Image: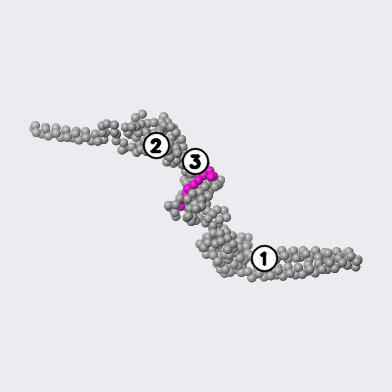
Amino acid sequence: MKKITLTLSLTVIGVLGGWYLTAEELAPSGTERDTSSFRTAEVNRRDIGSTVLATGVIRPKIGAEVRVGSRASGILERLDATVGEPVRKGQLLALLDSMPFSADYDEAEAALAIALAQQTYARSQYDRAHQLSATDAITATEFAEFERARAVAVAEVQRADAQLKSARIRLSYTRIMAPISGVVASVSTQVGEAVAASFAAPTFLTIIDLDRLEVWAYVDETDIGRVEVGQRARFTVDTYVDTEFTGTVSAIRPQAEIQDAVVNYVTVIQIDPGHGKTLRPEMTTNTNILLEGRTGAVAIPNGAVRRDNDGTFAYVLSADGTPVRRAITIGFQGRENTEVVDGVEEGEMVVLGSVDMATS
């Protein structure tokens, strides 16, 4: 019986001793304190920025996408353009059958020659009549008739010349030239097809200038009030995941675009040159519009800023590692960090997340 009692006593002492050692490990004596349960961040100076996030799409600027057509009707005789081919402004792209227009031009040219000959004859007749009228060899009425004939001949030359210019212009319509430099995006007509130009010019092909693109960022109605012309922006596209493009807000369109009961406003962003990558229309963008910010501000992470009925505060680690509540005055608040105007000093450590024990 005594042997059994001794064994139980030793067992209890061993268990109690084990518990005591564990407590020492969790809360060691002295000035040190285990702060491993706290996530902390140092108070330091940093640049604070705020952004508006928006999904966008790359679009050609006004005049950067041109549908090339013809103002003349006829048979397409030649087409010197393929999709994806770069073209220069003024480059010949297509030819229509020019025979009917050439015939009209030749006819107008001949009509001008006849009018010039008649003008020369009318002037010579007028000069002779002028001499005769000086000697009263002809009447004033007869002289007026020669004068009228000369004026009519001059007008006929002017009309024939205008008709020749018109024929020349119509003939030029058979030569389709590139109105801008760019890349051929599509071709909609083939050689041998008949082109009928009536109220609208038929489209032969489409040219896009890839150096004149912009971003249409769709900004939510809750954020559009913070966006202004002139603000800087950054965006990425899925094609170049490692490249960040930059630009400037150039316009905010007043008309809303509503999709699935969500109201967005198109914010146009002028793309900065020199990124060394080729952007293309309809690429989707992830856009950050940069709002106002602070440079070199004393700041702490947003997760360290706390609020209750008594005001705004943060938990600051004391010298022995204890989190102590301290009232703070905050300034500008960005997406990740908040400016602290008063309440903490550079180099101090603030607590992030929950705090189980704190002293006031």
- Against 342, residue 47 (above or below) is below
Q: Which residue is mark 2?
A: 43
Q: Secondary structure at mark 2?
A: loop
In which quadrant is the C terminus drawn?
top left
Figure quadrant of residue 128: bottom right
In which quadrant is the N terminus drawn?
top left
Span shown in magenta:
227-238
Ranked by sequence position, the earlier of labels 3 and 2 is 2
Are the residues at dot 2 and dot 1 in contact (C-beta closer than 8 Å)? no
The amino acid type, in three-letter code, at marker 2 is Val
Q: Residue at x 87, y 67 (%)?
A: 131
Q: Give 80 or 91, whichever is nearer the viewer.
A: 91
Mark 1 vs mark 3: give the one in front. Answer: 3
Distance between the Cα atoms at labels 1 and 3? Answer: 60 Å
Is 133 a magenta residue? no
Ranked by sequence position, the earlier of labels 2 and 1 is 2
Q: Which of the labelled discs sits on residue 292, or is there none?
A: 3
Q: Residue at x 48, y 56 (%)?
A: 278
Residue 248 image point, x, y percent: 52, 47
